[in-house]
Amino acid sequence: MNVKDIMTEEVICAEVPGSSDQALNLIITHNVTGLPVIKKGTKELMGIISKTDFSKNPSEGQLALLMTKSVITTTADTDVKDAVKTLLVAGIKRLPVVDGENNIMGIVTSEDLVWKVVSKLDTDEKVTSYMMKSFTAVWKDTPLKVASEIMRLSGSRALLVLDSNAKLYGVLTDTDMLRVAQLTESTKKSEMSGGTEGDSWGWDSKNIIYITKRKLEVPDKTVGDVISENVITATKGTKVADCAKKMSQARIELVPVIDAEGNIVGIVRDVDLLRVLK
């Protein structure tokens, strides 16, 4: 099986020159983790932008300065297993598919591979072979601003959410954060005196500089206010293919794993399931 057999041909792309706000709106509207960036009026690949880029540098308004310019790509005739190896080694979630002139033809993502390939595998392997046993969790009544900082400090793209009985309540993702966050601007006035030290007289002149700062502001809500209680889960006995099907049907990239008593024992991400294709 080659990349062309599973890639998405109708690719949502951001364009340069353009603003980072426009790219962020595309990511939220289409519920994707990232976008290729092409030169306006062409299909020439110029870079790639992901959700984490906006969290790291929300003040940057120019897409060309925010995007990653060095992009790992693949071709339509590449074997799927080779594409998987590229994703896993590079630690990325998406590979733009380009032709010989670096024009974008499609894109293959970890979601594509899990939803279209892993979900159809005939294997008895269980998710426990691929799940992560270490993860970050927060209480459902945690202020969203605190959860956002926990997500940043832990480097997590998703947090498990617990109720008051320490049972699974839901999942908070970086997409949830971006969906409710608002881009705000604040302006600070800075004054620099133009006089010279020791002068007995002089012009009372000052240079006034206005500094405008943009940032993504999380609202005064709790985690439970912005997530759904209808969380999709797997058990220790769930087969890899069945877990992939759940991800495909719910259009999600992470599934908590619970035991018979409902206790959380791990999480399975789409990138974890890619290892079954190696």
Image (spheres, rainbow, N blue to C red):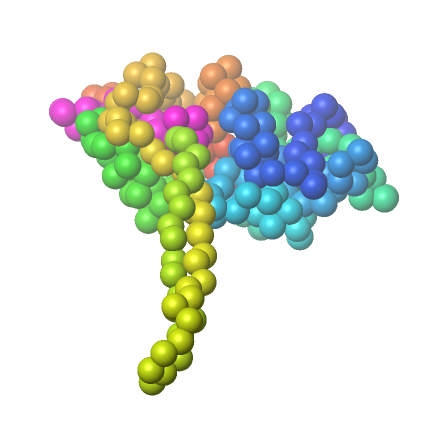
- Name the quadrant containing residue 152: top left
Q: Position of residue 274 (x, y in %)?
A: 55, 36
**Apparent side of residue 77 relative to residue 175 in the rendered image (left or right):** right
Report the residue at 33% width, 82% height from top. 200
Report the residue at 54% width, 28% height from top. 25
Magenta range: 161-180
Q: Is residue 173 visible in this depiction of the protein?
A: no
Looking at the image, residue 137 lies above or below residue 198? above
Q: Which residue lies most toward the left here?
A: 165
Q: Which residue lies most toward the bottom here?
A: 198
- Name the quadrant containing residue 75: top right
Q: Position of residue 90 (x, y in %)?
A: 58, 50
Report the residue at 36% width, 36% height from top. 217
Residue 221 lies in the magenta stretch: no
Quadrant location, the N terminus: top right
Quadrant location, the C terminus: top right
Question: Of residues 65 and 223, which is closer to you in this image?
Answer: 65
Q: Is residue 8 visible in this depiction of the protein?
A: yes
Q: Which residue lies most toward the front here?
A: 201
Residue 164 lies in the magenta stretch: yes
